[in-house]
Image (cartoon, grey):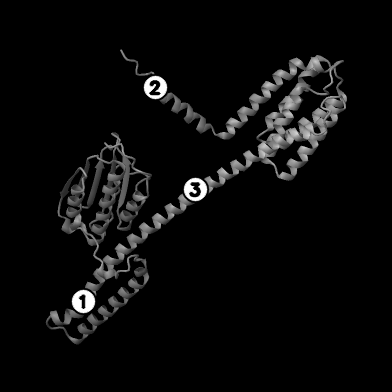
Amino acid sequence: MNDTSVAKPGTRNRSIWGLMTRLGSRWWLDAGSAFTALVLFSVAWPTLHLTHQMPWPIQPLVAALAALPVLLMRSNALLGWAVSAGSALFIALAVPNVPGEAIPFQVVHIVALYFLVFAVALRSPLQLVAVVWAATSLLLGAALSAEGVGADPWAWPVSLGGSIFVALLLRSLIRSRSELNRQTEVSDLERARRTILEEKARIARDLHDVVAHHMSLVVVQAQTAPYRVDGVNDAARAEFESIGATAREALNEIRGLLGVLRSDGQLAEHTPQPTAADLEALFVGAARAGVDLTWTVEGTLAVVPDTVGSALYRIVQESLANAGRHAPGAPVRVTVDCATAVELIVVNAAGTSTAHAGPGGHGIPGMQARALAVGGHLDATPTPDGGFRVRALLPLGPATMPLPVGANSAVI
């Protein structure tokens, strides 16, 4: 019998990497500092009696002063360096060495000082880094040269300077990466904002075209009514003229406000907009282009208002484009029901092609905005089999529609 509870090596590696990512870099830096301090302390305490003369109860305290300031490497490296340097000076002056031992403090203390100077160079202003470098060089040079260790006065400044130089290079690299990430994030946000604005402009243009069409019909009807209707008296004729003038004024204002949104240079009233009647042509064209598409239309599309029909057409168009982009080769099923409201369901299975679909865009927010613009709502969710499902409910009239059963905050 196969044991299905055994995880695959790749899955285990991804889980470990996911855990490391969730913990974050700060956690790992703190863990590394704690581990380093523990190792230094475990070396300093057992060997302290070999280098210094002191009662055994005081040895853990002196060893802690040598090793534990490393714990402050990330949180406050400057304070850690001050504690370590001050304790080194105190031990050199106040704690006697074992006869024959020349170094006034432990090697562990020197290693801790190097760690802390490196950490200070990573995070502190350059002026403080220079002060720390000079003070540490003076401390090590004076304390060790006095005991005949490290007679070359430039050895410690050069050695510390090399450590600081590496830290500054790493600091510059980290800042460059951070700035690059920040600029990338700003670019992504700007791209998303521009895409949403462009989609809103398209919606405004579509609404402008539809409204301009109907307002033009009002003007024509008002102006021709006295000639089409018998028995129109002067008062009614004047009323029709007033209606026509008001409609023309409103139409001119709409053109003035929204006409600038056109990006193709065409006049708004000369640009036909798709309606629900154009869905059949859209389905046939998608199927001819290679999409494995099946569709069902229940009810009469002729009852769908032009504004709602335009939004319906664009939502179907975007849904088919998303299915082809993110699930290439997958079968797509479209259902349109025009009984009491326009209910659209577009479902695609998981993609069968291994082609890279590219990064996700902002099509779903655009579809939701179109549905909201006509008084409807739309939700888009993954399906259990790895596919995707788009469901939109659009009104046939001004009546308020109830939210679908199970609607959540993702529904607009």
Cα gap from disc 2 to disc 3, whole angstroms: 35 Å
Cα gap from disc 2 to disc 1, whole angstroms: 73 Å
Query: In the figure, residue 78 lies in which quadrant?
Result: top right
The residue drawn where x is 37% and y is 48% is 361
Place of residue 76 in the rendered image (x, y in percent of width and height, measured from the top left): 69, 36
Judge whether 217 appears above or below 21 on screen.
Answer: below
Place of residue 306 in the rendered image (x, y in percent of width and height, measured from the top left): 23, 61
> Mark 2 or 3 closer to N-term?
2
Per the image, label 2 sits on a secondary structure element best described as loop
Q: Nearer the viewer, mark 2 or mark 1?
A: 2
Answer left or right for 229 relative to 409. Answer: left
**Residue placed farthest to the bottom in the image?**
234
Few, some or many residues within 10 Å of mark 3 (<14, 14–19, 20+): few
Q: Which residue is mark 1?
A: 220
Q: Check disc 1 and give the amino acid type.
A: Val
Q: Which residue is mark 2?
A: 8
Judge whether 326 appears above or below 227 on screen.
Answer: above
Answer left or right for 297 relative to 216. Answer: left
Q: Nearer the viewer, mark 3 or mark 1?
A: 3
Q: Give 205 or 98, whichever is nearer the viewer.
A: 98
Cα gap from disc 3 to disc 1, whole angstroms: 52 Å
Q: Which residue is mark 3?
A: 185
The residue drawn where x is 34% and y is 69% is 259
Place of residue 286 in the rendered image (x, y in percent of width and height, measured from the top left): 21, 49
The N terminus: image quadrant: top left
Q: Give 116 or 71, whichever is nearer the viewer.
A: 116
Q: Is residue 167 visible?
A: yes
Few, some or many residues within 10 Å of mark 1 (<14, 14–19, 20+): some
Judge whether 320 appears above or below 352 on screen.
Answer: below
